Image (cartoon, grey):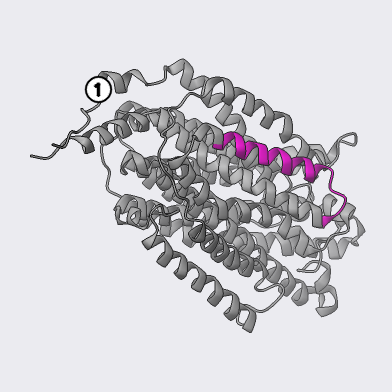
Amino acid sequence: MTTTAPPADPAEVVGTRMSRREVLQALSGLMVGMFVSILASTVVANALPRIIADLQGSQTVYTWIVTSELLAMTATVPLWGKMADLYSKKLLIQLSLGLFVVGSLIAGFTPNVEVLLVSRVVQGIGAGGMTALATIVMAAMIPPRELGRYAGIFGAVFGVGTIAGPLIGGLLVDTSWLGWRWCFLIGVPFTILSIVLLQRTLHLPVVRRTVKIDWLGAVLITSGVSTLLIWSSLAGNKFAWASGWTAAMVTGGVVLLALAVLVESRAAEPIVPLDIFRNRTVSLATVASVLVGVAMFGGTVFLSQYFQISLGKSPTVAGLMSLPMIFGLLVSSTIAGQLITKFGRWKAYLVAGAAVMTVGMLLLGTIDARTSVVVLSIYMAVLGIGVGMLMQNLVLAAQNDVPAHELGAATSVLTFFRSMGGAIGVSALGAVLANRVTSLMTEKLGPAAATGGGSAEVPDLSTLPEPVLRIVQDVYGTATADLFLVGAPFALLALVVVLFIKEKPLHTLSGDERRAQEEAAAQVPVH
């Protein structure tokens, strides 16, 4: 005679829910950790010229100081997400924060660019864990119907960390008694604070079961993605887009990912469960996340360079000029989150966000070296408003439409593809920018002068005579505007994709409560 465990008492399930005060206390630690992990990707933007000069690095190193951290973060997100479905989420978050502290300390005391690049990889692995796990933990604690209230705040934290990084980096570089090393060290005390807060406030049940990590799948996914990202950052710079190197690297990356798909389809505990893509909402949200990553990261990362070179602003002022985008993102993500919680409807914000983001990209595609700060601020605010409504609510839509035991996988898949889109956007559009600058400089000053503002080195404006300075500023203004025009079709495609996402009512139980009910229902015999 077969016996089955009785279903969980709903009262017991609901009784495990954290109070609003406990949720807010735990979120304080999560928000601090997430902010510093995102900040690590962008804080060096305004400091890069000084870092490269002090460590005697090249233009290739300039790109890779940003790309290496994004690459490590992107490639490890699926692994962190899978482990969140199998192990203690609290332990994993603290481990990721610990790795971030180690990477930050190494970077802060680096003697050369080689050690700096290694430290950025370690930082990226830790940041990947924090980026994926923060959203997973939120879904475990908070029902989707209430998640909008908190997701809006988290979307704002993500956006502020992304865009405020250049401002903080510029202030640190321009402060003589601090310097660029504090771009890395500043995150250490905040990360330690996050670890302490989470240890004291985060209380989640640990599901103990026999687990098996698909390490072969993890290696293949990481290797395939890394190969394609390395190719996208080098093509058009170190070798031609249409070349033997391109053929070899693209083929290698595609083969590795094809093998990963084969392995994942047969693994007992796949890193990325392929059946999750049978869910229409997850598939469409994933595609939209890639497009958002390309458009947002690919365009905005180079705005700092435009402020300093084309407009002639200092690192600090360049950072301050990012504030309209931060404000737009903060306001739109917070208001949208509150309205979603109040009315339970979310698709309208996805559609509106994608449409406004597209308009923002097109507006920024009209800038040049003579665009006024007021006009530029309006264009940036429009882009920020669009991203704020769209980015975090894509995750909410996917989390609401998957079983509770796949929350970690679904969240990490979206985070992974958004980060991958960002890494591809930064590396590929960086190569496009370098080529565009080189061709424009060649056209205006002749072949001999092209290396002064092209892919070889970033120009030092203080050493240029007035006529050449004006030409260089015009060139960078034109080239930056072209990047947004290249990115605008990706934003438009994101709009098309979200139109096909079907709106479904938001759950009123948290992830842990849903999981308990699903497991209880699975144990009830079918008559």
Q: Left or right: where does residue 40 sit relative to residue 385?
A: right
Percent coordinates x, y for residue 480 in the rendering: 65, 59
Which residue lies most toward the front here?
A: 1
Q: Is residue 420 magenta?
A: no
In the picture of the structure, the residue carrying the numbered disc 1 is 10
The quadrant of the picture occupied by the C terminus is top left
Residue 363 seen from this side = no
Q: Which amino acid does the dot numbered 1 rest on?
A: Pro
Q: Is residue 429 visible?
A: yes
* Number of marks in picture: 1
In the image, 142: left or right of 170? Answer: left
Report x, y in % for residue 440.
72, 72
Viewport quadrant of the N terminus? top left
Residue 135 locus on image (x, y percent): 48, 37
Q: Which residue ends up furthest to the bottom in the rendered image?
A: 244
Q: Is residue 93 magenta?
A: yes
At x 41%, y 34%, the residue is: 207
Going by the picture, which residue comes out furthest to the left?
Answer: 527
Which of the two residues, 238 or 268, is positioned nearer the viewer here?
268
Tell me which segment is drawn in magenta: 92-113
* Residue 21 drawn above or below residue 35: above
Q: Is disc 1 placed on a helix, strand or loop?
A: helix
**Residue 14 percent across, percent down from the top left:** 31, 21
